[in-house]
Image: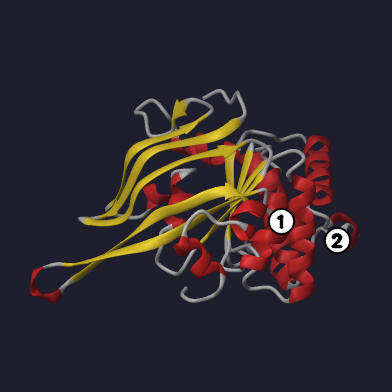
Amino acid sequence: MTENGAHAFELQGVNIYYGSKMAVNDVNLMIPRQKITAFIGPSGCGKSTVLRSLNRMNDLIPGARVQGGVFFGGQDLYAENVDPVEVRRRIGMVFQKPNPFPKSIYDNVAYGPRLLGVRGKAVLDEIVERSLKGAFLWDEVRGDLKKSGLALSGGQQQRLCIARTIAVEPEVILMDEPASALDPIATQAIEELMKVLVQQFTIVIVTHNMQQAQRVSDYTAFYSIRKKEEQGGVENRWGILAEYAPTERLFTNPASEETERYIRGEFG
C-alpha cells in the first residue's frame, strides 16, 4: 500500500450492501490528497456508509459487503493480501460521539503507539506531547495528564480522540459528524483544528451541517436517495452520489436541480 499522485482515494463502481439490501449504488469518486472533502446529503443517503468503506470499518458490521474498487494510493483496499488493521492505522477515524477510553489522558494517546510496540517512556512522552499539541489540547491538559479522559468536556474529549488518532501517524483522518454532539464554541474549535490538520493529513468529513461543509471543505460530495416500489408495496431505498465538485462551485452553481433543491433546504 503506497500512496502517490494527487488523489488519496479512487472509488470505482462501488456498491455497498447490508445483507441482501443495497445501501449505496455505483459510487465513482476521486478524493484528493491533503484537502478536506465533505460528504453531505439527507439521512439514509449512504454518506457514512461510504466513509466507513474507506478504512474497512464496514467489515465489522455483520452482512456488510463492498463491490467494486476502493483504491488507496493505487492499492485495492479490499484485496486479499491487505490487512484491515493496517488500513485502519493508516486511515484513522473520529466518530460522531467522543469516545475516549476509560483511561488517563496520557494512556488514551499512548494506546495506539503501545499497540505498535513503542515501549520507551521518553518516546511515548514525546508522542503524547506532539499529538496533544497537534490536536490543540496540550496547553489545557499538560499539567494533568493522569486525569481521566472521561472527565474532560465534550469538545476536549473530541480533541483527545483526534490526538489519539494522529498519535499513530496516519495519512488520512475520516470524521463522521465530529461536531454534531458539540456546542458552537467547541464546534468552532474542531473546525479550526481541521484547517490546521489538513496541512499534514487528508481529511474526509461527513456532516449534516451544510454551513460547516462550506466553511471547512475544499470539495463536497452530495449524496441522495433513490426509491423503487416492489411488488407488495415494499419500498426499496438506496443511496447514490448525485454530484461532486469543488465546494464553492457546488454551493453557488450546482450542476443539478436536485443538488440545488437540497441546498435550499427543500428536503433532507
Q: Amino acid at mark 2?
A: Val
Residue found at x 83% / y 39%: 126
Q: Secondary structure at mark 2?
A: helix
Q: Is residue 255 left or right of residue 217?
A: left
Residue nearest the viewer, comparing 36 with 253: 253
Identify residue for label 2.
141
Q: Position of residue 61 (x, y in %)?
A: 35, 55
Tag 1 residue: 216
* Nearer to me, 104 or 26: 26
Residue at the spot 36% in from the left edge and 29% down from the top edge: 79
Q: Residues within 10 Å of mark 2 (few under 14, many from 20)?
A: some
Q: Can residue 211 be seen in this snapshot?
A: yes
Q: Type of residue at label 1?
A: Val
Percent x, y of residue 17: 29, 52
Is residue 147 found left or right of 86 in the rendered image? right
Q: Quadrant of residue 73?
A: top right
* Image quadrant in which you'd find residue 191: bottom right
